[in-house]
Amino acid sequence: MDLFVQSFPIFLLIFCRITAFFVVAPLFSMKGVPSAFKIGLGFFISFIVFLTYGMKQTVIPDAQYILFIFREVLVGLLIGYIVYLFFTVVQTAGALMDLQIGFAMANVVDPMTGASAPLLGNFKYMLLIMIFLIMNGHHYLLTALMDSYQWIPLDNELFGRLYEGSITEFLTKAVGHTFMLALQIAAPLTVSMFLTDAGLGFLAKTAPQYNVFVIGIPLKIIIGLFVLILLMPGMAVLFDKLFVILFDNLEQLFGIVQQAEGQ
């Protein structure tokens, strides 16, 4: 009984971080994944982490224990948010493509989240998920989550880093970086649509008898889909680089909090 009383507070902290990660992280937070499976998976992973890491830790369940719980939940949400942020790159790029082609009004229901999503963005997101699973990316995510206890231990100084503003600065740069990546992914199709609009503008000036509003809509759809087909073979390489950037940002996040431990 004494062993249970000493071990349960540590296990609860580990369980809070892992389940908070599952709430936000892609794949694990999908609407189609049963809640019982998420809780069960979080419990067993927490138990494994507890046996390998938590047995060596000591936590006193005093008045500060509530703050420890909030801190672990915040760490899990922060790690999951970084992963989710880079997965939304393709949806943002798809929304920009839809706006240029003319599919902006043709939103569909995303089966992953149950929310409305852009047509090409949803297509690219499902393609990203498929490539991520083929590359065993979910295994790397779980490994990164379990290794986070080596970088961000239970006695971390996350609140101090939040007060200093280093994590806020990192998140701001990450959001700007992901938006720039979305612009780069959508750039080939956006440029081709801009050239198409410019050509239609010259057509309207040189041959006013043509109704460019009637011609332009199907023409932009045809050219946009043709360019998208040309870009499809390079999507796997592009997504692979996106995953590399994702795990590099996770390492940077761990390093920011670990730097606080070294001070």
Image (cartoon, rainbow, N blue to C red):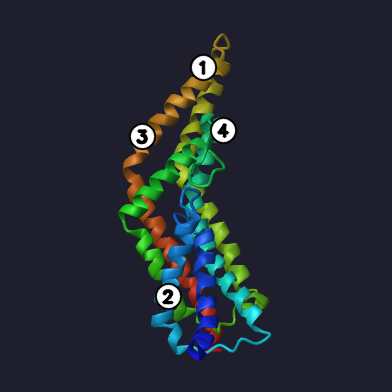
Q: Position of residue 54 (x, y in %)?
A: 45, 83
Between disc 4 and disc 2, whose residue precedes?
Answer: 2
Return the residue at label 4: 104
Q: Quadrant of residue 155?
A: bottom right
Q: CA distance from mark 4 to mark 2?
A: 46 Å
Kindly identify which numbered label has been placed on residue 215.
1
Q: Secondary structure at mark 1?
A: helix
- Three-letter code for the amino acid on which mark 1 is drawn: Ile
Q: Residue at x 46, y 66 (%)?
A: 42
Instruction: Characterize the local packing of mark 1: few (<14), some (14-19) or many (20 or more) Cα atoms within 10 angstroms.
Output: few
- Three-letter code for the amino acid on which mark 3 is drawn: Ile
CB atoms of marks 1 and 3 within 8 Å: no
Between disc 4 and disc 1, whose residue precedes?
Answer: 4
Q: Position of residue 205 (x, y in %)?
A: 58, 17
Q: Residue at x 43, y 43 (%)?
A: 124
Q: Residue at x 47, y 55 (%)?
A: 26
Q: Secondary structure at mark 4?
A: loop
Between disc 3 and disc 4, whose residue precedes?
Answer: 4
Instruction: Characterize the local packing of mark 2: few (<14), some (14-19) or many (20 or more) Cα atoms within 10 angstroms.
Output: some
Q: CA distance from mark 1 to mark 3?
A: 22 Å
Q: Nearer the viewer, mark 2 or mark 3?
A: 2
Query: Could you say which is closer to the camera, residue 1 or residue 98?
Result: 1
- Three-letter code for the amino acid on which mark 2 is drawn: Phe
Q: Secondary structure at mark 3?
A: helix
Between disc 2 and disc 1, whose residue precedes?
Answer: 2
Between disc 2 and disc 3, whose residue precedes?
Answer: 2
Does residue 256 show up? no
Return the residue at label 3: 229
